[in-house]
Image: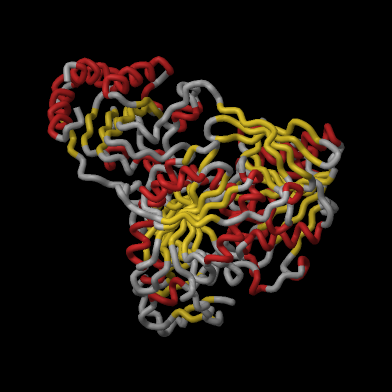
Amino acid sequence: MKIIVLVKQVPNTTEVKLDPKTGNLIREGIESIINPDDRHALEAAAHLKETAKAKVTVLSMGPPQAIDAVSEAMGMGADEGILLTDRAFAGADTWATSSTLGKAIETIGAFDLVLCGRQAIDGDTAQIGPQVADYLKVPQVTYVIGIEEIREKSIVVKRRLEDGFERVECDLPALLTVIGEMNTPRYPLVSRLIDACREKAPIKTWNAADIGVQTRDVGLEGSLTHVIKTFAPKLQRQTEMIQGDAKSAVKTLAGKLKEKKLL
Amino acid sequence: MTVWVEVDLCSGCKRCVRACPYGAIEMKEGKAQVQDRCTSCGACLQVCKEEALQTDAKPREIPDFSDRKGVWVFAEQREGQLNKVSLELLGKAQELGAALSQSVSAVLLGEGVAGLAETLIEHGAETVYLMEHKALKDFRTTAYTQALEELVKQYKPNILLMGATHLGRDLAPRVSRRVEVGLTADCTELSIDPKEGILLQTRPAFGGNVMATIANRYSRPQMATVRPGVMEAARKPGAKGKVIKHAASLTENEIGTKVLELVREKKKRANLSEAKVIVAGGRGVGDAGGFKILEELAAVLGGEMAGTRVAVEEGWIQADRQVGQTGQSVRPELYVACGISGAIQHRAGMMNSRYIIAVNKDPRAPIFQVADWGIVGDLHEVVPEMIQQFKKG
């Protein structure tokens, strides 16, 4: 069984702060991590490596420093890693990203399963999985919480719904996106991490020419959607602070609520 | 393709710094300087009055889309039950349709679902495109994608909206790739640009720290998914509409997936999206017992209890009661935030509430900025007092 895992290096958005004057993101000093959902995809792949003798290739697209995410994925059990990095890939929307990743997967060759996280915490779009699946013309199952059985030509998985779950049989090859409920990701092994940082580590970096794409089809030029404005969310209201001890404050509040017919 | 600054022309006005969505322009000795993280998006070029910002990028031609008409809403149903978000989207679609002078339609796929068309018409659909087939009984991505592809190619809509539900977030990206268009996920605001007549899609990014407005100039339909609970349904009592039936050409062996079992979990799940009142707690509640008291207040007010991500992570409440960026978006009449500091991720999920009460020990807690009424105090004293006084009415 051959598995390709898609991972993204993301800024840890829970630490992102805004410059109170300009409203811009303060990017300095924010730690870069493997996207949390992608970690669960890596764990699922590592588990299949142990139980179904799968060979695992990890594929990432990003700036040169995203090599750290690939190395960490190797530490979690991937057999080989590929980083797609090129100035031409910058500024890509999900259309251009899915074209690039799709082309790279075609370049890698035959596979049985593509695994990825449901969504990345910097964009939260959850679009890359299904868009890559359509590019590759393979069926998809999203929000996967468990792999129950691998049959000769299909896989049986459990998929989370808002109010329950589904059990779905899906033909192989296929693409699955997984969520945190699926498993508990292992820590990378230090020995594997050290190997991943060696010169002979099986990590390749590919640029646009390596996967045979034109600049006009990738990155910002190949994108169909564009950010035209960003701004800090406006959430403020005219707040009335109610004074007094608990008893009198609640009494005042009750009066206000009655005025608005909320009580 | 690069962007650079002609230093002699730069007046140091900083307009470009503010305009850059990527924070890639910095001021150095009074002049703008483009940083490595620039993606050549061109946002700065448009705001520079001195024409100091220059690029070698060729302006991209916008194709002629004058034949693309109509605002479409995908009507999400499972087992014959319409998802509320589809009606909310029809509410918004009426506004967008009016701004464009274009009609509003719904797309209804399934088996034995024709009866739902009436509800869609009552909520603003002038036309319902109906495709029924046994292969469409359960939601399956490939089958639904193929059905939508056929309809979109035949009727050429201008805009296509779906709910950002598990189903919509599975289907929309697949359809967008298939019909070769851009897609914006999880929008919280939609409007029509009065000059260009394009759909402006606004969504939170970077974990809700930034709002981004996105345009889809180069492909049609302009596709977006919208978070449930953000838009408002608008009933049109007595409205008349037509149903256009469309035959499906689907064969089972092309679909690739089979639903073996669908299990709805029996336990009473919170229905936060329908609740008129929500009493929510955060870290300040302290333990699961504290949430019992919030539950009591919720019961007195006829509402639901909810909480922040911390409350879920601590195991004080179930995950289906989480409000916020990674939980649900809610818009009740009244939201009572107890012991919630008001991290942006939480605020993103409750800012659309009609009225907000905040109770917190820390007078500087950001939650007070978004509240209509604030009480600085210990919720363990204030909430029991509320229960007692509100009970009396």
Which percent across, then down, holds residue A74? 76, 44
Residue A190 or B313: which is nearer the viewer? B313
* B230 versus B197 height, above or below: above
Residue A120 in view in this figure = no
Residue at 34 percent across and 70 percent down: it is B194
* A133 versus A152 height, above or below: below
Residue B291 in view in this figure = yes
For the C terminus of chain B, which image quadrant?
A: top left
Which percent across, then down, holds residue B341? 35, 34
Say whether residue B29 is left or right of residue A64: left
Residue at 28 percent across and 27 percent down: it is B361
* B134 versus A97 height, above or below: above
Which percent across, then down, holds residue B241? 39, 55
Residue B184 or B26: which is nearer the viewer? B184
Say whether residue A147 is left or right of residue B302: right
Residue B246 or A95: which is nearer the viewer? B246
Which percent across, then down, holds residue A46? 77, 37
